[in-house]
Image (tube, rainbow, N blue to C red):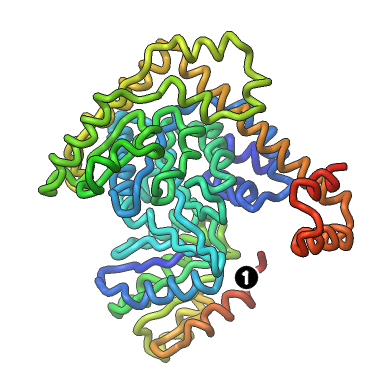
Amino acid sequence: MDLVTTALAGNRRAIARLMTLIENGQEAARNAIAQLYPYTGRAYLIGVTGSPGAGKSTLVSQLARAYRSAERRVGIVAVDPTSPFSGGAILGDRVRMRDLFTDPSVFVRSMASRGNLGGLARATADVVKVLDATGFDPILIETVGTGQAELDIAQLAHTVVVVVAPGMGDDIQAIKAGILEIADVLVVNKSDCTDAERTAAALEMMLELGSGHGARRSALSSDFMRVAADDASQSAAAATDHWHPLLVKTCALVGEGIAELVEAIAHHRQYLETTQELGLRDLTRLVNELERIVRDDLMKALLNGIDQVSLSDLVARVVAREIDPQTAARQLIG
Amino acid sequence: MLVAKPGLDGHDRGAKVVARALRDAGMEVIYTGLRQTPEMIAEAALQEDVNVVGLSVLSGAHLALLPRIAELLRQNGMDDVLLIAGGIIPDEDVPQLKQAGVHAVFGPGASTQAIADFIRSHVRI
């Protein structure tokens, strides 16, 4: 039996090896994904993001426990950063998830970001597909500790949970663009801290000002999207009632507020399902994925067709200011 | 690779130093933390599909814990995983551990460079 068949039958070793194959971008991975793809699209994807130390891993661990007590099979993909200097990484998210390790209905996979800047690894979406196809639902996706601009998770997850720790800064931070804008559910974690109320109040204020949520999908999507998606789905997005992000206070360490968080996520899911947002999110995600693959493959094909010498000549001319990068690029593409 | 501390001793400074050094040597190191059972370690190694498992034991329970982990890895079909150990392990116990499937033991004073070199020369990627 091949690896995909064995994985689909539920063999954990096969699932893990398939993920490695995909993560390392081997050619065999393409066939594997093609085989898996018809089985995907069933799992609900929950993204958890926020700054380093906000409590993402602890929260994910608590969420997993909550879903386990509802007899769900839970998949977890946790991403930590790769060192830009050595290429190495410390993947430490498992430290907070220790009580899940030997539960056969939980599968935890750590990933290094490997130079990707959007808060996820390049292969994260495909690793999630493996869990989806092999029957894990929901799948919790934990990003690297993020700052203000790592927004890939908004493309991948159905519901995005942004975790904020108290004392994150004054209320001007709360009205900046970026990570807070992609939250479907906002969590103020470490609610036992003295600053928690103030942080929650600042975020409440931001939420009351309203969010540009309906516009977000199309703003994040690409030229490709504008061509590929028909007008109907675009206008459906505009017409949809806007989702007002929910705010939940948790103390993940002791499990406080987790039931409320699970409920908020369910509430958001219901919203996605009753409006046309769910289908639109899938559409956006898949169009973006298609675009990325096309871009990568075109680049590869282009590089194959250019010999090393003429490329370094061209680069040398750009460096010497003899030719500008725009013109050089046009020459390369021909 | 996976770095884990089986058993009950609560000192993971050494394990963290090794994890950090191997990060700087360009490896992806999954650190699972303290007080792991052999079952937890074997399952983590399986899910993460690692090439190397590094175990740190300071408590003196190495003769009980390490062969058990080696056995569980084999049961999971992970015979090809490089299993190395460190911590306080008396020289006279090393032959017994090697026979049980531990590939190398690095005691106090072993340089992290030596550990990284050993891993590089024994893992096919």
- Furthest residue in direction left, as rendered: A194
Image coordinates of residue A16 in percent, x first then y, are 55, 48
Is residue B60 something that shows in the picture? yes
Q: Residue at x 34, y 22 (%)?
A: A268
How many numbered marks appear? Answer: 1
Compared across the picture, whether A228 is left or right of B61 comes to right
- Front-most of A58 and A313? A313
The answer to whether residue A263 shows anywhere in this view is no
**In the image, residue A244 above or below residue A152:** above
Q: What x and y, as percent, mark residue A277?
A: 46, 17
Q: Please, which chain is the residue tagged with disc 1 on?
A: B
Q: Secondary structure at mark 1?
A: loop
Residue under the image location 39 percent in, 66 percent down: B4
- With respect to residue A73, does A334 lie above or below? below
Q: Amino acid at mark 1?
A: Val
Residue located beneath label 1 in the image? B123
Q: Nearer the viewer, residue A191 or A12?
A: A191
> Residue, x 43% and y 46% (percent of image)?
A143
Does B58 appear above or below A232? below
Spot occupied by residue A65 in the image (x, y as percentages of width and height): 29, 39
